[in-house]
Amino acid sequence: MVSWTNLKALAPGDPLQALARRCPAYYNRYAGVVDQFGFALETFARWEPIFRFLFEDYFHVKVQGIENIPGEGRAILVGNHSGLLPLDGAMIAMAMCHWHPSPRRIRFLATDWFFSIPGVGDWIKETGQVRASLENAKILLDKNELVGIYPEGLRGVGKTFPERYRVIDFHPGFVQLAIATQTPLIQVATVGGDEIFPNFANIKLLSQLLRMPFFPVTLGFPWLPFPLMFLPLPVRWLINIHKPIDLGYPPEKASDRKLVLRIAREIQYDIQRNLNTLLRERKNLFTECDN
């Protein structure tokens, strides 16, 4: 049964005041702070009730290990990507905002394509995401921020339904970044996102004509009118956050391509094994997870 409780916060009024009531620690941390990448607390506050509704009332997300994300200091979160629309990052952000003892934002690195969509680029920046580049990531880590990276990139969210939860080879850049900046890595395995928009096919010709990374065929897209075409299935989610790991290599090892690739593959396989375990333990897509 879907509850609509959190959407009551969308009632007319000051979204910042509503956020201050709902999550005072998060509000106090970022109120009045100017961010060079465009994060706007008011925009976050305006959209937070919608994402919290999805998190608590629609997907009923369960999170294991939220305490493994540090309340202070830098870290890189790395995980499997899924869902056509990148809701997996939003769900982790909601857990961090409302469940962590020291709430803070996670700066997910977003690919250039999202910034090319009219009206979407500014919204992405104002809700906390940052254009993906090594330089931007280093700036964030120098400021002791949390950086979220999905090394599968757009390939991860564009998987077809038969490919769900098969982790595509990780781009090793996150390992190079971690070693160069001496930043701990936190692995995240997410179950649920691959089924909210079952993707039955990718039509390459249409994606090329429309300059899209892929053109999916789902239960709603492109058949139903907007916004019904983007209505996700109410699948139950489980997010497992691992303890931070220190790779233990000096910064100069960041240029060792064989080492960086080997570590990236090891982390990829660790996350794949964790996904396999979580999937075996899951009983039903639409009922509460046992974990």
Image (tube, rainbow, N blue to C red):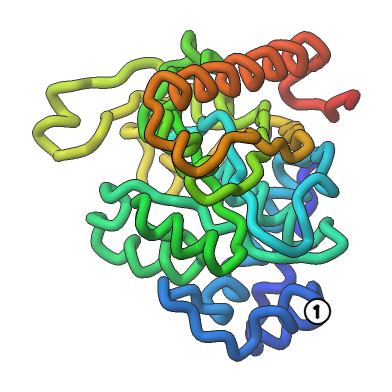
The residue carrying pointer 1 sits among few (fewer than 14), some (14 to 19) or many (20 or more) residues within 10 Å by Cα, namely: some
In-image side of 7 versus 289 (left or right): left
- Picture residue at 70% right of the left edge, 58% below the top: 52
- Picture residue at 83% right of the left edge, 40% below the top: 65
What residue is disc 1 on? 24
Residue 147 position (above or below residue 153): below
Q: Give the camera-side residue of 253 and 10.
A: 253
What quarter of the picture does the C terminus occupy? top right
Q: Position of residue 76 (x, y in %)?
A: 59, 46
Residue 33 position (above or below residue 245): below
Q: Position of residue 17 (x, y in %)?
A: 71, 87
What quarter of the picture does the N terminus occupy? top right
Q: Position of residue 21 (x, y in %)?
A: 81, 81
Say which amino acid is labelled 1: Pro
Q: Is residue 207 visible?
A: yes
Quarter occupied by residue 269: top right
In-image side of 239 versus 162 (left or right): right
Q: Give the camera-side residue of 41 and 176.
A: 176
Instruction: Residue lying at the far left in this picture: please name it.
Output: 209
Q: Position of residue 14 (x, y in %)?
A: 64, 89
